[in-house]
Image (spheres, grey):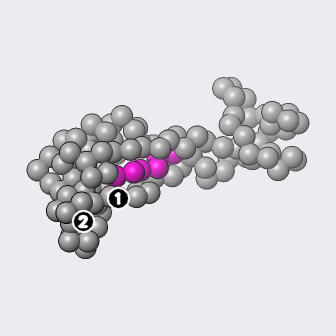
Amino acid sequence: MHEYPATLEFINIAAQKARAANARRVTRVRLVVGEQSGLAPESIQMYFEIIAEGTVCADAALEIETVKTKWRCPRCDIFYERRPLSFACPRCGEDGEPTSAGREFYVDSIEVAD
């Protein structure tokens, strides 16, 4: 459900960029979505196809890069992907700390055409 307003917002951003560039259409939108952002890439894709219809974003390619969640070991100072049911650092075994990696949601790039 959170995907609908987020998708609507980035379509509006892409349309604004197209207008600013005097372009008639958006050809590609590239998003970065973190695993812990609370947004499902599959739902974003579905809503994009529905919302973009009849706009300058219709028929644009949507590329979604998913960012894995990373943890940081306070002892080793390394970043790692946590294993299921464990917070342990793969190098030393100490419990890691959550980081902001994996919470991203932003428009990375927009391509337009005349």
Q: Earlier in the sequence, mark 2 or mark 1?
A: 2
CA separation, marks 2 and 1? 9 Å
Q: Which residue is found at the position 15% from the left and 54% from the top?
A: 55
| Residue 49 appears in the picture as rendered | yes
Seen as rendered, the residue at the extreme top is 85
The image shows a total of numbered marks equal to 2
| Badge number at residue 80 | none
Left or right relative to 53: residue 100: right
Seen as rendered, the residue at the extreme left is 54
Residue 59 at x, y = what percent? 20, 45
Residue 5 at x, y = what percent? 29, 51
Residue 44 at x, y = what percent? 33, 41
| Badge number at residue 18 | 2
Under mark 1, the amino acid is Ile
Between 90 and 14, the residue placed more toward the observer is 14
Q: Secondary structure at mark 2?
A: helix
> Which residues fall within the magenta stretch?
29-34
Under mark 2, the amino acid is Ala
- Circles 2, 1 touching at the beta carbon (< 8 Å): yes
- With respect to residue 80, does 107 lie above or below? below
Left or right relative to 67: residue 41: left
Q: Is residue 31 magenta?
A: yes
Seen as rendered, the residue at the extreme front is 114
**How crowded is the residue under tag 2: few (<14 C-alpha within 10 Å), some, or many (20+)?**
many
Q: Determine which residue is flagged by label 1.
A: 110
Q: Which residue is found at the position 14% from the left and 46% from the top?
A: 53
Between 78 and 108, the residue placed more toward the observer is 108
In the rendered image, the quadrant that contains the C terminus is: bottom left
Between 42 and 27, the residue placed more toward the observer is 27
Q: Is residue 9 magenta?
A: no
